[in-house]
Image (cartoon, helix red, strand yellow):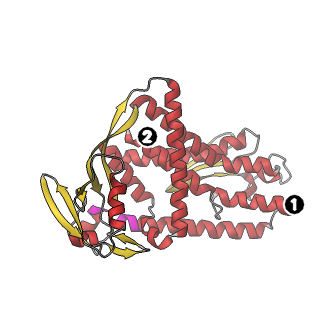
Amino acid sequence: MSVLAAIAVLAVLIVVHELGHFLAARSQGIHVNRFSLGFGPILWKYQGPQTEYAVRAFPLGGFVGFPDDDPDSEIPADDPNLLGNRPILDRAIVISAGVIANLIFAYLVLVIQFGIVGIPELKYQPGVIVQPVNTEQSIAYQAGIKQGDIILAVGGKELGASKNAIELLKTEIETHPNQSVDLTIQRQQESLSLQVTPTLKEGKGHIGIELIPNATSVYHRPQKVQEVFGIAAKRFQQLVVGTFQGFGQLITNFQDTADKLAGPVKIVEAGAKLAANDSTNLLFFAAIISINLAVINILPLPALDGGQLAFLLIEGLRGKPLPNKIQENVMQTGLVLLLGLGIFLIVKDTSQLEWVQKLFQ
């Protein structure tokens, strides 16, 4: 059920995004002839008075279609309510509305979560928790460190129950490259003493692990309505900034971050795990993915909203649009590349699922 819940969240976010485009167009009187969830062959459709609503076979996104792109449309090419005949500002509003819808939705979801579930506060326990060790060749793996271990002390210094515990551990590791460092680890009910020798990487010590605070969330009821909106706004800002920073790191440090790229399968798996632990986590999951969807779509890449906005910017600077042939070739190439990346990530992520790996063991 948790997997279905995560898939449902993704479907809702796609609908929200496309609904933004749809409502922005219809509110301006612009003709819309298609509203689709997914791509490819039609599985289900309903023909409304003006628009065809459909669910398609490949759930890798969705689209809103306009008569401008339909050779079978009976609407005259000079109709002022065709999207292509509208001023640049009108078209920019329609194109950017999907991103805006996802951002608004993310904020409202955070408001609902904090208002209903409560406002979370972290209650720290001693040490930090080891996330999956990067590779079997990593220094941490070779030293015997495993996922789920709690590192309590480094170099004889206790990390304590603090939000600064991770920084303290990172500092000790990074400042002792090629030197043996003693770690005190709790593994279930067992206490272990391990030694690890960080390798020198980019001027700092490195052992190849990811860490999370050893903390649990304790919820308290908001005192005022204003508190909910204020906390939601702060968390929303943190998520947006963090998402942009993540994409920035992907661009500037692609070799080290490319392996962290995730497609729909991994996203569903992560959402399912969150839902399995606590169903209310789906709200936070929805907010995070909605913000990521907005940021991805605003990037100036072909076949994305940002790419279409880039064409509008060029049109505004030139005083006329680029030739249709150039725009179509760029958008089609971008769409093929985007779908190819989506399929690649689906195959990659599926092959890494535990139950799939067991089939080949």
Mark-to-mark CA distance, 2 and 1: 45 Å
Q: Main secondary structure of the magenta part?
A: helix
- Say whether residue 192 is left or right of residue 325: left
Residue 239 coordinates in the image, percent (x, y): 50, 48
Q: Amino acid at mark 1?
A: Gly
* Residue that numbered label 2 is attached to: 283
- The region drawn magenta spans 348-354
**Image height of 308 relative to 163, above or below:** below
- Where residue 158 sits in the image (x, y, percent)? 24, 53
* Mark positioned earlier in the residue sequence (2 or 1): 2
Instruction: Say whether residue 271 is magenta.
Output: no
Evaluate whether residue 86 shows in this view: yes
Q: Are marks 2 and 1 in contact (CB under 8 Å)?
A: no
Check disc 1 and report the residue beneath it.
Answer: 319
Residue 75 place in picture, x, y as percent: 79, 50
* Above or below: residue 174 compared with residue 12: below
Residue sitting farthest toward the left: 190
Q: Quick one: SS at disc 2?
A: helix
Callout 1 secondary element: loop
Image quarter hosting the C terminus: bottom left
